Image (spheres, helix red, strand yellow):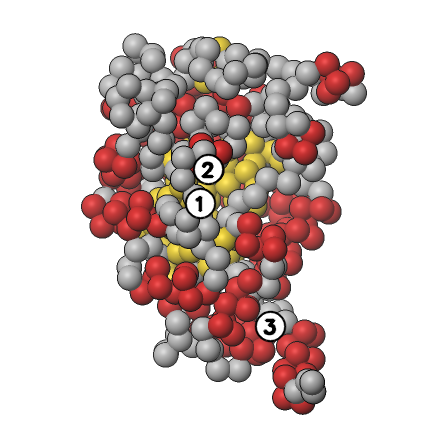
Amino acid sequence: MSTATAPHRASRTAAEGRPLLFSPYRLAGVTFPNRLVVAPMQMYVADQDGKLNDWHFQHLARFATGGFGTVMTEALMVEARGRNTYGDCGIWEDGHVAPLRRLVDFLHGQGTLAAAQLHHAGPKASRQRPWEGRGPLGAVESARGEAAWQPIAASSGKTLDNWHEPRAATLEDIREIVAAYGQGARRADEAGFDVLDIHAAHGYLIHSFLSPVNNDRTDAYGDSLEGRMRLALEIAEELRRFWPKDKPLIFRISCVDWRPDLDERKDGWSLEDSIVLAKALKARGVDMIDCSSGGIRSASSGTDFLLKRQPLRKGHQTPYAERIRREADIATMAVGVIVDGPQAEAILQARKSDLIAIGREALVDPHWALNAARALGIDDPWSMWPPSYGWWLKMREEIGIAD
């Protein structure tokens, strides 16, 4: 990855005496410029053919100039039937590669790693864009050319009330899905991405197989923890056929379900199950676990369910990253209500995770990473900003602002 056009990044490589948050990190054959990753965030504004457009470009480009060492795309769908909405970005055909490569080239030009997330919505497919109702596609959408389709999942009938009922995936469906992930990885590599993240959380397709809340199959893809893990492990194996071994492969999982209301077996998928899965994924070439939670049979992520039962707390998912890191002996990424630099630095210093993912806070402040450097007392933090910004801001600080 070239950094010739990004002189403002040079100061980050001097890790001596720096906060861990702004020190390099090595995973597989890739060196991360710092420990900050922009988490995948759906925009729901893709063209109907799934192609990345100028909105996505500007949305993600600003995080590269904002100091994040790694910028991850929103979820890229490996199949058209796996879309959440008609506005989802895709990687299910070769025509998706060129606009993705344009983004990757810009990120690399800023000295930033480019990460892609691959995804299949499974039982949550065929729904409205969130601001249009957060429900299933219906007559209004059909009238404007966005007809509903039937989702697929581990088992039939397992979905939210009034949503389109999914059918149980056949063995042929499963073979097609596994192959689609492999081809998605091939296209991501062709586009030049440095890091690949697989969305296996939040009640979507892979999670629908993992969780006993959603999976009541009696064949080889259900009936036991080993059976419920089979799809995730087959996908990992297929990915490593196409994704280079020296490029990091990450799995985002829901470390816990937290749905005792849906499963008499306590909380469904458990943290202990996640540790078993993490070990099995590591044996198949996965380098890191991206630690989220919840989302099984809820409208979005685990937040919908959690908010009904307890306040949302800072770093509420970080303990999952810490325990999986320790007990599965695999690198982890912490995500979820990490709001400022000192909090993120404390997580790293305590060895609770290896990378920090920032989502909504980056929407609030695209320069979150650069402002975190200032908050952590890095010498001459303005040198980390793009030169076109930094000299102005440093001069204003030196002059001062009178009352």
Q: In which quarter of the image is residue 174?
A: top left
Disc 3 marks which residue?
Answer: 385
Using the rendered image of the protein, determine whether residue 211 is visible from the camera's viewpoint.
no
Residue drawn 41% across the image and 23% down it: 208
The answer to whether residue 382 is above or below residue 284 is below
Q: Position of residue 74 (x, y in %)?
A: 57, 42
- Foreground tag (3 vs 2): 2
Q: Quadrant of residue 216?
A: top left
Disc 2 marks which residue?
Answer: 307
* Element type where label 2 sits in the image: helix
* Element type where label 3 sits in the image: loop
Disc 1 marks which residue?
Answer: 312
Which quarter of the rendered picture does the C terminus lie within?
A: bottom right
Answer yes or no: do the residues labelled 3 and 2 have beta carbons within 8 Å? no
The answer to whether residue 215 is above or below residue 331 is above
User: Does residue 17 appear to the left or right of 388 in the view shown?
Assistant: left
Residue drawn 56% across the image and 16% down it: 163
Nearer the N terminus, badge 3 or badge 2? 2
Using the rendered image of the protein, determine whether residue 268 is visible from the camera's viewpoint.
yes
**CA distance separating discs 1 and 2:** 6 Å
Nearer the N terminus, badge 3 or badge 1? 1
